[in-house]
């Protein structure tokens, strides 16, 4: 559909305005991470990496960031393994309870996070499980499992049943068929689902707040700093997170992109 040139330019201007509103504050944070600030004034002659040095010297932020990566890695591994198992069961299990099985997986993702967090908090207290990073991984896994499960299930449903039948006809076992036939086709979907799971886990605050112990993750640390105010080294942290996110996105795209 072709728009008249005034409408086309108006749409481009509106799209540009939306991009500025969304990403303008991030661009400001990146620029300010290299300069000293006094109140609302910026010393443009102080260009350097001083705030990055102070960020790396900030032990509290470093511990919170390490805890966040530990929780994210645990969530990705657990959710991808469980999501793959549940997707295979739904696709090939033939159980009459598959609908209920899917509803149980999807429900924590649809519920408000505070409901999921409170339910987990009560459950852990009743069974006597102390709150720690492990309980945070469990909570995050319940949250992202539906997304991972659905991503892998869609890939399974797109595969031709003749692939499995041909493997069995040639004498392959179920384990060999999964390893040499299904797994290569599921690899890109699993990688994409893992990246999404890590992104959700990295950003999750409410469930983490309810089920964590004495170990803080980065979102909790930043949430606590809201009451006292952010220091300029947070601009350096935002810049590093943006750079890592961009690098991870490029790496994932290169992995999942079909090869010529």
Image (cartoon, grey):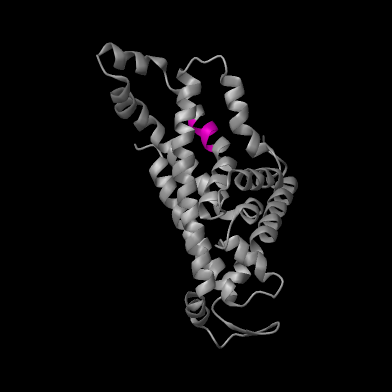
Measuring from the top left, give residue 206's x and y in whole percent: 66, 53
Q: Nearer the viewer, residue 216 or 3?
A: 216
The residue most toward the top is 169
Q: Nearer the viewer, residue 214 or 83?
A: 214
Residue 123 drawn in magenta:
no
Residue drawn 73% across the image and 42% down it: 4
Q: Considering only vertical position in the picture, is 85 above or below 253?
A: above
Q: Nearer the viewer, residue 155 or 220?
A: 220
Quadrant location of the N terminus? top right
Q: Main secondary structure of the magenta part?
A: helix
Q: How many marks?
A: 0
Q: Nearer the viewer, residue 241 or 64?
A: 64
Quadrant location of the C terminus? top left
Q: Considering only vertical position in the picture, is 159 above or below 44?
A: above
Measuring from the top left, give residue 64's x and y in whole percent: 53, 65
The residue most toward the left is 171
Q: Which residues are magenta?
A: 148-152
Measuring from the top left, give residue 181's x and y in whole percent: 33, 25
Measuring from the top left, give residue 69's x and y in whole percent: 47, 57
Residue drawn 35% across the image and 13% down it: 165
Residue 151 drawn in magenta:
yes
Left/right of residue 220 with respect to residue 79 in the rendered view: right
Residue drawn 67% across the image and 58% down it: 22
């Amino acid at each position: 559909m072709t728009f008249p040139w005034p409408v086309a330019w108006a749409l481009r201007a509106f799209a540009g305005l939306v991009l500025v509103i969304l990403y303008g504050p991030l661009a400001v944070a990146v620029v300010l991470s290299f300069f000293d600030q006094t109140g609302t004034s910026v010393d443009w002659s102080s260009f350097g990496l001083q705030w990055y040095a102070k960020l790396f010297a900030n032990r509290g932020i470093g511990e919170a960031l390490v805890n966040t990566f530990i929780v994210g890695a645990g969530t990705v591994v657990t959710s991808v393994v469980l999501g793959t198992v549940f997707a295979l069961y739904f696709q090939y299990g033939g159980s009459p309870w598959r609908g209920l099985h899917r509803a149980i997986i999807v429900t924590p993702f649809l519920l408000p996070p505070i409901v999921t967090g409170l339910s987990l908090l009560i459950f852990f207290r009743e069974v006597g499980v102390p709150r720690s990073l492990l309980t945070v991984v469990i909570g995050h896994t319940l949250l992202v499992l539906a997304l991972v499960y659905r991503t892998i299930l869609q890939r399974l449903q797109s595969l031709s049943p003749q692939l499995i039948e041909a493997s069995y006809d040639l004498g392959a076992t179920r384990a060999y068929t999964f390893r040499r036939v299904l797994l290569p086709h599921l690899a890109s979907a699993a990688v994409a689902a893992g990246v999404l799971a890590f992104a959700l886990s990295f950003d999750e605050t409410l469930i983490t707040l309810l089920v964590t112990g004495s170990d803080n993750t980065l979102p909790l640390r930043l949430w606590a700093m809201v009451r006292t105010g952010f220091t300029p080294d947070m601009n350096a942290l935002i810049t590093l997170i943006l750079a890592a996110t961009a690098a991870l996105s490029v790496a994932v795209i290169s992995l999942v992109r079909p090869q010529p």
